[in-house]
Image: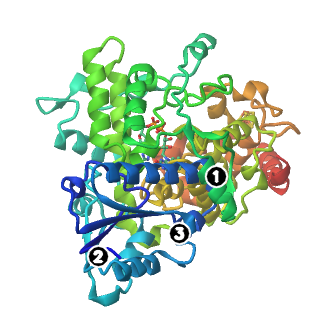
Amino acid sequence: MQKFQRLRLILGDQLNANHSWYKHCDPQTLYVIAELRQETDYVCHHIQKLCAFFAAMNAFANSLQQAGHSVLYLTLDDTAQYPDLPSLINALLSRYQCKVFEYQQPDELRLLAQLSSFKLVNSVVRQQVSTEHFLLDDSDLTRYFKAETRHRLESFYRNMRKRFNILMDNGQPTGGTWNYDQNNRQTFKANDIKAIPQPLLFANPVNDIIERIDRHQVASIGQIQGQLLWPINQQQSNQLLAYFCSHCLPRFGTFQDAMTSKSPHQWSLYHSRLSFALNCKMLHPMQVIEAAISAHRSNPEAISLAQIEGFVRQILGWREFIRGIYWANGDSYKLSNTLFATRDLPAWFWTGKTHMQCMRHAINQSLEFAYAHHIQRLMITGNFALLTGIHPDLVEAWYLGIYIDAIEWVEQPNTRGMALFADNGLLASKPYAASGNYINKMSDYCTTCKYDVKTKTEANSCPFNAFYWYFLQQHEQRFNHNPRMAFAYKNWQRLSTEQRRDIIARADYLLDHIEQL
Ligand code: FAD
Ligand code: SF4
């Protein structure tokens, strides 16, 4: 058996080819990439997500090998006998007589706790290094984010613009304003829909992976049509980034919040679909930001400042901000349930079989492609879960399983904080609660829905309407002094006692029949 001085572990979301580890080939270093049941089973994942991770891990192992590194790729078959990652690592350390075990800092608390504390065999030395991926390192996070403290995106984002000198001119925001949200909230008219570009889809063969997943009886959700359409290596990730810059960025900001069920083939609209490539670190956030800004600078007529600002805000702002909230609040965040939500997740979240057209569309698209854009996640499925008081643990298990990009550090604050207000406003200044009116304004869903978005208390009234007022009434004590909710509460108080009673009765009825909605 060959001996190695050092074993370096690469996790499935650490596929950063530009990491300093790979600058030189060292014959004394063995890289290990492993398919593990502890990772396939901690939540029930979408089949495309399982395939995408394994295919990307496999491709990364091959590229390292071709570059001259020693790599051990272990499939589910190879790791089946080990109950968890520590037992596998210890077995390999013994087998290859290693003296040092190195790993990149995991993005998730559960993996960090596991890798930093398990007992190593044979007095092996443990070393943790950075993933060299995020824009902010640990000391920045500690400086910017405090536990149990309210943080707001806008001031964080402005600091990030200044600090990294992105879209800045002489210390001022390019164009004179920080935020183009007002220009960025348009909806699709009939002609707009025809112009939506086709998504760039790949055709990665994954039959052997599907066969392995089936053989090991790994539970999964969703569908896959033979080939995997998601990028699995740096080259495909770069292609997707270039495609986004040329085809989607020109209207990214404009239609960022819009939703439609009338473009089944252009299901990702003007969104980038880069989250999987980013979260697996096949793309670096600054590379994405620079590519987008360079596309804007070379063609400012086609890609206006409003588009580019809207996009930069997502990566430079939201993505790093969410990560700060996750690490500042640690394990306590995952227990947060400020609104005491206790309801079960309706079974149709897993099948899409509901009469509510907005929910049906968002869920079916997620089951088909492991993807929904931000407003579908926040204002359709998230809004429903918030208004009806579904337990955050159940909501989290759904989001963490179903989306191609779902990894706890980014899923958790988005779900608990942004969608469910379970963190009591550490992340958002008010709950993102909305009635059918908002959904009708931002989409064409209501035109083909069984329910009537214009009414509240009829037998066919939109459930979101009654649920919205029910939510406000339920949490009146908590929110009626929130200035951002004042307008909503004024409207609620303007209703007569009978009107309010009828709305609450309708909401109670709908909640009793939630499985049939
Ligand atoms: P685009 O719309 O093209 O945006 C570009 C990039 O900006 C994204 O790829 C992403 O990296 C980043 N970004 C945008 N918004 C956010 C945000 N709120 N938080 C962090 N990054 C952001 N994103 C994940 O990556 N993983 C998740 O598990 C996840 N779970 C979510 C759960 C809920 C309830 C909500 C409301 C949002 C969640 N998001 C998550 C954030 C966002 O919805 C996705 O990043 C985005 O939809 C991915 O699609 P895209 O690449 O086409 O994004
Ligand atoms: Fe959704 Fe209500 Fe519109 Fe139907 S009417 S699509 S349930 S918002």
Q: Say which residue appears at 27% left-offset and 40% top-offset.
A: 286
Q: Residues within 10 Å of mark 1 (few under 14, many from 20)?
A: some
Real-space Cα separation, disc 2 to disc 1, in angstroms = 33 Å
What colouring does the structure picture have?
A: rainbow
Ligand 1 closer than 8 Å to label 3 CB:
no
Quadrant of the image where one finds ligand 2? top right
**CA distance for labels 3 and 1:** 16 Å
Q: Which of 490 and 395 is in front in this view?
A: 395
Quadrant that contains the N terminus: bottom left
Mark 2 is surrounded, within 10 Å at the Cα level, by few (under 14), some (14 to 19) or many (20 or more) other residues, namely: some
Which mark is first along the chain, 2 or 3? 2
Precedes in sequence: disc 3 or disc 1:
3
Identify which amino acid the numbered label 1 is placed on: Ile
In the drawing, what numbered circle is on residue 457?
none
Q: In this view, does 243 lie to the left or right of 207?
A: left
**How far is disc 3 from disc 2 in space, using C-alphas?**
19 Å
- The residue beneath circle 2 is 3
Mark 3: few/some/many CA within 10 Å (<14, 14-19, 20+) = few
Q: Residue furthest front?
A: 1
Mark toward the viewer: 2 or 1: 2
Secondary structure of the residue carrying tag 1 is: helix
- Note whether residue 435 is visible: no
Q: Tell me residue 270's x, y (percent).
A: 49, 26
Q: Which residue position is annotated with label 1?
A: 210
Who's the residue at 48% across and 31% down the image?
271
